[in-house]
Amino acid sequence: MGVSVRHQTVTAFCAPIPTAVGLAFRLGELPVDFRRRGHSASIAPELNALTLRIGGETYSIQWGGPHSALPLLSQGRIAIGLSLQHLKEFILVPPDSRLRSAEDLAGARIGIPAEDESARAEAANGFAEALRSAGSDLSRATPADLPIEPSSADAGSALARKLAQALLLGEADAVYANGSLALGLQEIVGARPIWSRQASYPLVFWADEKLVRLHPESVDRVLAHVLAASSWAKTHREAAHRLLAKEIGLSEPALEVVYGESLHAELDLGTSADRIEAFNRHANERMPGGFLRGTFDIAGRLDPTRLRCALELVTQGLVEPPSGEGVSPYALAPVPDSFFLERKAAHVIGSDEEAIAVARQIAAQIKEGASERDRDRRLPFDELKLLGESGLLGLMVPKAYGGPGVSVRTLTEIFKIISAADGAIGQIPQNHHFFVRSVELVGTEEQKAFFFAEVLRGAQFGNALAERGIKGFKEMTTRLKRANGGGYRLSGSKYYATGALFSHWIPVTALDEEEKRVTAFVPRDAEGVAVIDDWSGIGQRTTASGSVVFHDVAVPADRVLPHWRIFEKPQTFGAFGQIMHAAIDVGIAQAALEDAAWFVREKARPLFRSGYTRASEEPDLIRRFGELGIRLQAADALLERAAAAIDRAEQDLNETTAGQATLAVDTAKYFAAEASVEIANALFEVSGTSSMDRKYNFDRHWRNVRIHTLHDPARLKLHNVGNWYLNGVYHEYKI
């Protein structure tokens, strides 16, 4: 006669150990951090292991109790932290057993399963400790060995099946089991607990000796994220339990039954004397039988330095704290190829008038759902595909190369139109047009022919311009070096890479071996490129303005542009880049003022006892809308004037016309920033308290414009303009 137990059900209840490592991994900052550094991290919860791949080598950090830890520590692994958790222990009997309490166990046959001698010794001692705690007469209990094949591919399932068989076939009167295994037996075969307690369970975390020796900083970063996750869990109990339950394959109620309600507060690591003593006591008391030769002292295998360094990283804010919102799916995985491949051929726009008409049509489509995309941080893949198919990415391709070559005035108007519909989508193509213009200015004929054809087919350029922690381009760490056999190799890391996630090509700003600024055009799917959606700004939430990492990327010589040459003579290139930003701000301000007017007309109530039937009739509100409307018109007029100045300068480019264009753009940029922030803030001033209800999501206008206007400090524009009016000196954009 045999006993059949469903394998999947049993396996589910042989859960891994819940730890802050798994929590940190699920929160996302740990794997994202390693991806930013050109490494990778993966977790195997069922093996209680975190795998790190660094420089082509694979290492591991693991965790477990004394039974699993001691053999490996004796083989050269290094302990890097200790944790103490509570775990429920149960004495279980068959559902129809006459045994009702632990006192009835005198003379009973006790099932103690194990896959090897040391595990059996640990289980037997744990059971003996349980009996002592229950007050049962240990001397009259009879052990009933339940051997398990050591070579079992799934020891957890084998253990569960053996216990279930022992209870159902009468091989034992009772069994001792702890954790999820005990819960599983109750669920699967109806085993009935006659006693339980919550016991302290020590865990040790250990690492490959080679990993600690060669890459201590990586160990430190793992531990820093673990410390940050355990700290986060203490103030986010429900969310922590939800993630831990998902990690180990239990329901949330089952997690609390097995580990108790305080699990979220028991995840931190330490190397203190009390933890060392607890681990040693557990090891020496519960693992006799010849497995330990002499008294074990983990202090000799513990490296406390790593945990101290990790704590320093956390204290100094050098690791990102976890967020309950988690990370974007595209922080760890690439955008599906279907986004790039499954699209219609791009329309080629023929004139400035058609370009504006197409922009208005697209704006009407993308405005729908803009608030929901921001609220849910849902990236605008469908909308950007539509933008590419519409032909609006090809606006700046010169007429000589088959494009419409629209005026800067037209381009500026289009940025206002799109940004009024969705400020985040409005920002994304700014860098695209910036680099189309750079190809026009310093590209070879072959480069122009190639890249302009790409753009007219709908290809999008992203950007990898900015780096964190540097004061100027000369401190840039992204480098382009000549490779043996021709071409170049590119390495570095960028941030604020708006549009890169959605792009076909990523133009990368780097310094060459002569310390000159160049632009390398890299396919977004090239080997060694990692585009990471780790943008966490309060506004422009759907721009994916995160990181791009380049690890020894091959770049052909004909994909490199001498960006520095743009600035060897009078130019409007800097002003061209800036005016698009100003147009984005004005577009967002327009949307904010329109929403304010709608709310006051349709939703707001007039002041109590004002005598007016509608809020829109109040003189003070009408006056305030007048002020805001004038500011918006002024910003719009300055923007149009600046765009016309760039167009004029392009017809007769010299130091004076270039200077006049730059002065006009700096003026427009400063005023657009000031006016747009005021208007987005005034939306609530004129609309009242009810306008702040989350269902309207009006705060997105303020968040979007506030963060975008920081792109270039307004005070610098004010200085540039003031220097002209005081000293007659035009500002020049240089590198």
Image: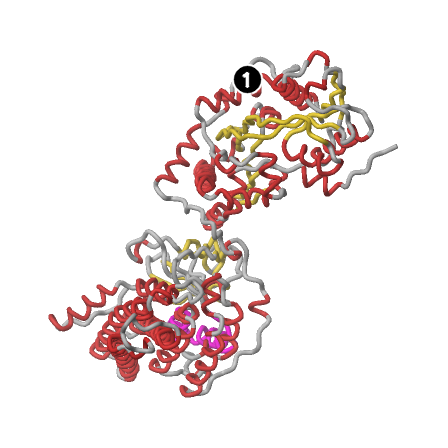
Query: What are the residue bounds of the magenta stretch?
Result: 431-460
Residue 192 relative to residue 134: left or right: right
- Quadrant occupied by the N terminus: top right
500 over 216 or under it: above or below: below
Say above or below: 39 vs 720: above
- Is residue 147 visible to us here? yes
Magenta span main SS: helix
Q: Nearer the viewer, residue 492 or 564?
A: 492
Nearest to the observer: residue 507 or residue 598 = 598
Front-most of residues 197 and 51:
197
Name the spot of residue 7 as percent of width and height, x first: 75, 41
Tell me the residue at 35%/78% (across/down). 412
Q: Is residue 309 above or below residue 572?
A: above
Q: Magenta stretch containing residue 532, yes or no?
A: no
Compared to residue 649, the image places residue 377 above or below, namely above
Question: Which quarter of the picture shows residue 675?
Answer: bottom left
Q: Secondary structure at mark 1?
A: loop
Q: From the top left corner, tell me how far across and down residue 166 is, in percent.
A: 78, 28
Figure quadrant of residue 154: top right
Residue 498 pos. (x, y %): 42, 63
**In this view, which residue lies farthest toward the top?**
139
Residue annotated with mark 1: 296
Quadrant location of the C terminus?
bottom left
State yes or no: residue 440 in magenta: yes
The amino acid sitting under disc 1 is: Phe
10 Å crowding of disc 1: few (<14), some (14-19), many (20+):
some
Left or right side of 670 for 506: right
Give me the residue at 68% from left, 41% from top: 12
